[in-house]
Image: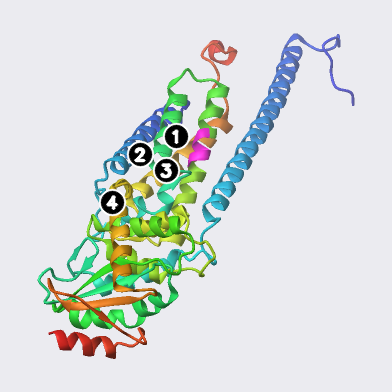
């Protein structure tokens, strides 16, 4: 799989994640209950729980900022440093998602589909960003091996 | 056997070219290996930082709650929410009143949310009264505050206003019931802003931003002051204290020696019906 394909997939995933985080941020500040497929709106319980904020900042807003950072690092011209930055942002987001999901599972015993979808996106992004970073830089088009052909 | 060198005159031109290519490949492989090692170190560093961040978050969000703080967590909190919901779910609430608005009898309950005896009453006798009379539409219960067990007046007002603010969404009784269910050790200072926020977060369906805004509504501070005036006029010095009477008419003091037992309440209520 080419670096361009991986990067495009990551941009698509980060955009979807940004949409999810934006919706949850809107829900938080508007006070409207989130759309939820469960009959007793577990999303609302999770979104209004004590774990919905970190140091007074809504975790949805933290997620939104995280996705903006990830997307930003993917959209700038790509170098070794930007790939490292993308991976660092994504791994921090992945760790934070893992923490929030564990709170849902072990503290609240309720799950929010929006949060789980964001966690799934972060997991895929984490795999792709680590793989992409460890693969290193693709050989430039003007490399001797390319011109020799 | 010694390796061939560039200067070896015995080597053909082709052999020298292959030798140079092999050396270049070896150098590229070594550079790639070095770069890979560097990336692995960077990856390890990032993972280490992430782990530290998460540990700090876990410690920060776990500190100050649970284990003597009074605020239940996890399955314990869920059990309390389920208990309270099964008791009062479906019963009309209006502000600090639980019960049908046209219930013929009114019971006024003066309590301090930190009072252990109020807790005993709320967890033992009150459920029977609720099931038997309130749910049936015969009695409505009005919760009023009276500072007794809470040491700091500011804390008393803060927690009581928080309860009344939930009443703006007609959920005050969830807050009150959950407070009593998760009451902490008396005089331990467990009622903090975090506790109040955590408790509010457990109230099913409570819109937290609206609730937070309502806490600044002066109406509720005035209500706490009014409660104190009524209790003072009635000569109440302890909690729980009660007034009972036909709705909309003069309320009389209800002297209960043992608030944990339902029988005295039942006898008094039956007399009013």
Q: Nearer the viewer, mark 3 or mark 4?
A: 4
Q: Which residue is mark 1?
A: A66
Instruction: Say which chain tag 2 marks.
Output: A
Instruction: Say which chain tag 4 marks.
Output: B
Q: Could you give the CA–CA distance between mark 2 and mark 4, rounded to whole angstroms?
A: 19 Å
Q: Which residue is mark 3?
A: A59
Q: Overall secondary structure of the magenta stretch?
A: helix
Specify the segment rendered in magenta.
A89-93
Q: Could you give the CA–CA distance between mark 3 and mark 4, rounded to whole angstroms?
A: 17 Å
Q: Secondary structure at mark 1?
A: helix
- Place of residue B35 in the rendered image (x, y in percent of width and height, measured from the top left): 67, 27
Q: Which residue is mark 2?
A: A21
Q: Could you give the CA–CA distance between mark 2 and mark 3, rounded to whole angstroms?
A: 9 Å
Q: Are marks 1 and 2 in contact (CB under 8 Å)?
A: yes
Sequence-first tag of 1 and 2: 2
Q: Which residue is mark 4?
A: B207
Residue at 51% from the left image edge and 59% from the top image edge = B65
Q: Residues within 10 Å of mark 1 (few under 14, many from 20)?
A: many
Check if residue B88 falls in the magenta segment.
Answer: no
Q: Is residue B101 left or right of residue B86?
A: left
Label for residue B232? Answer: none
Q: Nearer the viewer, mark 2 or mark 4?
A: 4
Q: Nearer the viewer, mark 2 or mark 3?
A: 3
Residue at 24% from the left image edge and 63% from the top image edge = B96
Q: Secondary structure at mark 3?
A: helix
Q: Residues within 10 Å of mark 2 (few under 14, many from 20)?
A: many
Viewer-proximal residue among B105 and A144: B105
Q: Nearer the viewer, mark 3 or mark 1?
A: 3
- The colouring scheme, among rainbow, by chain, secondary structure or one colour, is rainbow
Sequence-first tag of 3 and 1: 3
Viewer-proximal residue among A32 and A21: A32
């Amino acid at each position: 799989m080419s670096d361009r394909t991986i990067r495009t997939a990551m941009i698509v995933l980060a955009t979807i994640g940004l949409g999810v985080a934006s919706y949850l941020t809107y829900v938080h500040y508007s006070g409207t209950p989130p759309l939820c497929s469960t009959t007793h709106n577990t999303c609302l319980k999770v979104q209004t729980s004590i774990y919905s904020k970190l140091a007074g900042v809504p975790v949805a807003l933290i997620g939104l900022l995280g996705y903006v950072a990830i997307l930003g690092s993917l959209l700038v011209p790509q170098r070794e440093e930007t790939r490292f930055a993308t991976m660092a942002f994504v791994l921090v987001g992945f760790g934070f998602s893992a923490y929030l999901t564990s709170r849902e599972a072990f503290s609240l015993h309720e799950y929010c589909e929006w949060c789980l979808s964001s966690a799934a996106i972060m997991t895929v992004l984490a795999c792709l960003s680590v793989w992409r970073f460890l693969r290193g830089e693709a050989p430039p088009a003007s490399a001797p091996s390319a011109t020799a052909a | 056997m010694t390796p061939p060198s560039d200067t070896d005159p015995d080597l053909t031109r082709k052999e020298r070219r292959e030798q140079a290519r092999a050396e270049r490949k070896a150098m590229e492989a070594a550079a790639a290996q070095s770069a890979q090692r560097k990336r692995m170190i960077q990856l390890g560093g990032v993972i280490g930082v992430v782990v530290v961040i998460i540990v700090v978050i876990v410690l920060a969000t776990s500190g100050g709650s649970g284990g003597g703080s009074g605020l239940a967590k996890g399955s314990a909190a869920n059990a309390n929410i389920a208990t309270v919901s099964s008791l009062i779910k479906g019963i009309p609430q209006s502000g600090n009143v639980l019960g049908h608005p046209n219930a013929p009898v009114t019971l006024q309950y003066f309590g301090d949310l930190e009072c252990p005896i109020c807790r005993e009453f709320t967890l033992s006798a009150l459920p029977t009264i609720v099931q038997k009379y309130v749910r049936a539409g015969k009695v409505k219960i009005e919760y009023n505050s009276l500072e007794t067990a809470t040491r700091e007046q500011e804390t008393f007002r803060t927690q009581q206003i928080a309860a009344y603010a939930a009443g703006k969404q007609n959920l005050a009784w969830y807050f009150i019931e959950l407070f009593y269910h998760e009451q902490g050790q008396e005089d331990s200072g467990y009622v903090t802003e975090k506790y109040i926020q955590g408790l509010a977060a457990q109230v099913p369906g409570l819109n937290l931003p609206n609730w937070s805004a309502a806490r600044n509504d002066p109406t509720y501070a005035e209500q706490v002051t009014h409660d104190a005036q009524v209790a003072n006029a009635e000569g109440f010095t302890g909690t729980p204290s009660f007034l009972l009477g036909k709705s909309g008419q003069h309320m009389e003091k209800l002297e209960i020696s043992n608030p944990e037992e339902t029988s005295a309440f039942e006898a008094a209520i039956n007399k009013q019906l």
